[in-house]
Image (cartoon, rainbow, N blue to C red):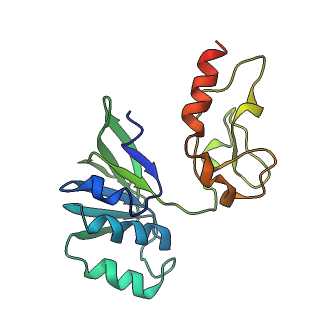
Amino acid sequence: MDAGSIMYGTGASEAPLCGGEDVYVVGGGNSAGQAVMHLAKHAKSVMMLVRDKALAASMSQYLSDRILGAANVQVRYDVEITGLDGGQALERIQIGSRTTKEADWAATPRLFVAIGGLPNTDWAADTAIVRDPGGYLVTGPDLLTNGKAPGLLVSGARALLPGDRGPGLLCGRGCAPPLDQARRHRSG
């Protein structure tokens, strides 16, 4: 899919690109809340998808009040993304209930992911994906084995390069997955 369809985090600069669109934000913390409010100024509608059963546990009260009071913002609780679909660009996402496991599809050209700095990578425990002792996915050229890199491309706080001290240092890694992919293709 087009790299502009799914974005880790967001800022004021991406919001004008969403004029008239129905967009989705994954996350329930302050970063996600700030993204929602930036996007709400331009998007037709913003749907915030939250794993918890309330915003209060992970968000400032003033921001929670602004989100819940915004006319074009809705919040769905106890949900997670369970599928993505599209050709060259994202066309729809599948949203699943964490409790009932029921899921539905929603049409959207954009998905913003603001999930914070703590990795939620237990799903990778029984795979060949390398994780460091803190649970972060190890990525980048240091994973090259016999001139081949794994097909996993990661950006954001779930990824940690060897030698990095924490996810805060990943802000400059946003372009790394495409670069890593290009290196992988060149190496055969």
Residue drawn 36% across and 40% down? 84
Q: Residue furthest top?
A: 188
- The x, y position of residue 95, in whole percent, is 34, 52
Give residue 38's quadrant in the image. Answer: bottom left
- The x, y position of residue 33, in whole percent, is 41, 71
Give residue 92's quadrant in the image. Answer: top left
Whether residue 77 is visible to the viewer of this picture, yes or no, is no
Residue drawn 29% across and 62% down? 47
Nearer the observer, 65 or 174: 174
Q: Quadrant of the N terminus?
A: top left
Q: Is residue 12 above or below residue 66?
A: above
Q: Is residue 101 above or below residue 35?
A: above
Q: Is residue 40 above or below residue 171?
A: below
Q: Quadrant of the C terminus?
A: top right
Residue drawn 62% across and 16% down? 186
Whether residue 169 is visible to the viewer of this picture, yes or no, is yes
- The x, y position of residue 175, in whole percent, is 55, 41
Nearer the observer, 173 or 62: 173
Nearer the observer, 96 or 138: 138
Residue drawn 36% across and 53% down? 96
- The x, y position of residue 86, in whole percent, is 30, 34
Relative to 133, 154 lies left or right: left
